Image (cartoon, rainbow, N blue to C red):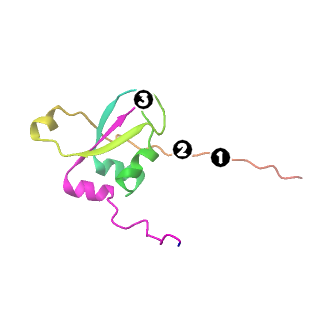
Amino acid sequence: MPEPYWPKKKGTFSLSDVHRLGHLLRISCRYCKTLRHFTPDDLRRVFGDIEVDDVIYQMRCSECRKTHTLDVEMVSPSAAERQRITLRRVDKIDYVRRVTWRDEGG
């Protein structure tokens, strides 16, 4: 008997949900052991309102530049922990404009 189809968007937990709850995202690299903290609102500005689990497929490690080595978890730090945490914030977003040329016979 074939398996039934389950919708992929059933019960998703997106970046806007994490922002609404006031959590931070802790992203760590399994290869080089770096640890970074991000606000979900900044990640939503960069990647759109995607699921929390899909964030690691959109990023790569800033130290070792490897893909598929990241882990993500939601944390709700206390006030004392939050003062010690260094947050990575969006400074600016650059869009690259590339030109392609075609030759016309003439």
From this view, report whether residue 86 is shown above or below residue 100: above
- The residue segment tinted magenta is 2-31
Residue drawn 29% across the image and 51% down it: 41
Q: Nearer the viewer, residue 92 or 66?
A: 66
| Cβ atoms at labels 3 and 2 below 8 Å apart | no
Q: Residue at x 19, y 52 (%)?
A: 22
Q: Amino acid at mark 1?
A: Val
Q: Quadrant of residue 93?
A: top left
Q: Earlier in the sequence, mark 3 or mark 2?
A: 3
Counting from the top left corner in percent of width and height, residue 27 is at 33, 39
Q: CA distance from mark 3 to mark 1?
A: 36 Å
Marker count (numbered): 3
Mark 3 or mark 2: which is in front?
Answer: 3
Residue drawn where x is 17% and y is 31% of the image: 84
Q: Is residue 18 magenta?
A: yes
Residue 30 is tagged as none
* Nearest the eye: 8 or 84: 8
Reading the image, the residue beneath label 2 is 96
Q: Contact, CB < 8 Å: mark 1 with mark 2? A: no
First in sequence: mark 3 or mark 1? 3
Circle 3 or circle 1, nearest the eye: 3
Name the residue carrying label 3: 31
Give the percent coordinates (x, y) of residue 97.
57, 46
